[in-house]
Image (cartoon, rainbow, N blue to C red):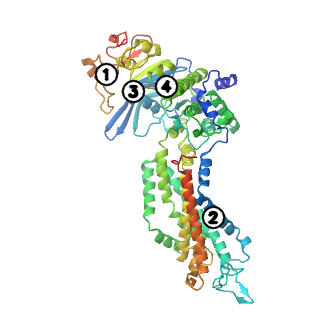
Amino acid sequence: MAIDAETLEEQPEPAAGDAVLEIRNLEVTFKTEDGMVSAVRGLDLDVRADEVLGIVGESGSGKSVSMLAVLGLLPPTATITGSAKFRGLELIGRKQKELQPIRGAKIAMIFQDPLTALNPVHRVGVQIIEAIKAHNPDMSNRDAYNRALELLELVGIPRPRVRIDQYPHEYSGGMRQRAMIAMMMANDPDVLIADEPTTALDVTIQAQILELIKNVQERTHTAVVFITHDLGVIARIADRVQVMYAGRTAEVGDVETLFSGSKHPYTRGLLSSLPALAGRTGKLQPIAGAPPSMLHPPPGCAFHPRCPMAQVLCTQEQPPLRAIGAPQQLSACHFADQVPDTRPGT
Amino acid sequence: MTDLQDLVTTGAPGLPGGDVSSSESLGLEAKPLSPSRLAWRRFRRHKLAMLSSVILILITVLCVFAPLFTKYGPNQLIRVNGVKFALQHPQHGHWFGTNERANDMWSNVLYGGRVSLAVGITVALASTAFGTVVGVLAGYYGGWLDDVLMRITDLFLAIPFLIALILLTDLPASQPWAQTIIGPSHSVRSIIFIIAILFWMPVARILRGLVLSLKEKEFVEAARAAGASNARIMLRHLVPNCTGQIIINTTLAVAAAIVTEAALSFLGKGVDIFTPTWGNLLGNNQGFLESNPALVLAPGFAIVITVVCVNFIGDGLRDAFDPKQLSV
């Protein structure tokens, strides 16, 4: 089935709680000179309507790659298998041309570095108008301009009538990220993927951008996928969290569940390496070792070389993702039921 | 959509906007500083380039409006008291003297400048446009297209420049198909075509390199994530970011094309010798260098001054567009 405006409109509007984006058994492999690198190894992920899903993981855990794969934004050296359905519409294996009406209009993405994500030679307003008109070619320039003004106002840029005509270099870093968000919200997407949108910003601006994304999400009911390595950020913004390790899901659950009753030693490790959580004193406990090379991922559970609970079984068999603990909680650990209830170190 | 409008009309209480207030007070009320405005600001500070611009504009005006500045046509026979007024030294009324065919040299230099400048500018525009297309396509798509386009570019660079030019100028005379494409032998049109065919390669290489680095920038990925097509990314995002290089190269190509045309005409292989061009004037009068130096020096200096001015302007533009030059 080819993707065009009509087929998109025929898709049922998702109700809250339904999955807008369903990823099943996604695998992404890169061909490199040293061999095949498996960046994502069988990922299942649901993005539900009107929620903020946080994806946490270390560098190289496949969190960004899986999202880029869904949008077809990976270089041709990547081999992608599995399935990613947007409102029932398969996205994997589509041609670039077929994905264009989806990108920006249905699934939008904001990036890590706002300083380079805006084109330096065009006025900010022009870039927003372009994003609008890319999906609404019949809209008049005046309407698009007014819409761009609305969007700048939505993302909290003061005096948008002045700012709309300015160039990116006249914006501060935080404002540029606001402008990016305006651009990506231009077509009222069903899913907004935010790939570490606050990492390149200083802490106070970070808080403002988080607040803004949350605010925009609450007003527009767009599902947000928030990719980060920062659990502190997750705690502030996410409704649900998916923890990724070595290209697979380690644990999924509501944000409260995971922070208080995690059933996976990796999540536990991440939490105890977090500074300044209320009520905790003493030294931070980093997770021993380094993330595995995806060129030769360890057999069995990829986390076993670093896991304090590892047994022989863990070196042999990949643990399946299974329901445990709280409702909606899934953990990929053979010994999930033995993960101690209290956080180590307290 | 309705949600957004709703939000805007009702206002967005509690939307943080603190990070911008500091820059608001810094007087950013003024006109937006576009990259081209910044470049113009830097260019204006380049004294030599500014002076060169003034001189070049003067030369261009003199040539384009030649009839206003001379009462003689370039091939008009001048008689004084019924006698052919040939090979005269510079004097009142004939600033550069007259040549052996009793034509006024001042008017020849002005009318010749029309052709020389036209050839220079047209060649520069055509070759830069073509080179830009080749370079952007090769850099953006990469892969086999890049290989094919760059090998063709290498092939053209390997052709001995002057020999190829000379051979090509005679091609339309013997080959009807060549005449239909590039016009009759030694016509201005054919000379423009022939020079341009051998001028686009450096631009293609430079633009390819630029696009190779630009396409990795996040704004290109962001544009793609926003649903932009390849054509849109190339036209709206990549080419505008190469404007500086494109302008610099066009300018420098103007100078090089003027010199090439002059060399070709001097060798008798350029525009036919009865059409005045600076190269033709040099070539036709070369025998009078000792007896009547103004006949050679006038077109010679016209070429030198024009080319030097164009090159200084190119330098000024290079400084103005240099992204590493951060001062405003």
Coordinates of residue A242 in the picture (x, y in percent): 43, 21
Cα gap from disc 3 to disc 2, whole angstroms: 60 Å
Q: Secondary structure at mark 3?
A: loop
Coordinates of residue A203 in the picture (x, y in percent): 50, 26
On the rendered image, what quadrant is the C terminus of chain A found in? top left
- Front residue of this view, candidates B317 and A282: A282
The residue type indicated by label 1 comes to Gln
Q: Which residue is mark 1?
A: A318
Q: Which residue is mark 3?
A: A58
Cα gap from disc 2 to disc 4, whole angstroms: 57 Å
Disc 2 sits on a residue from what chain?
B
Q: Same chain for marks 3 and 4?
A: yes
Evaluate if marks 3 and 1 touch, with contact meaning CB atoms under 8 Å apart: no
The residue type indicated by label 3 comes to Glu
The residue type indicated by label 2 comes to Leu
Viewer can see residue A221: no
Disc nearest the viewer among 3 and 1: 3
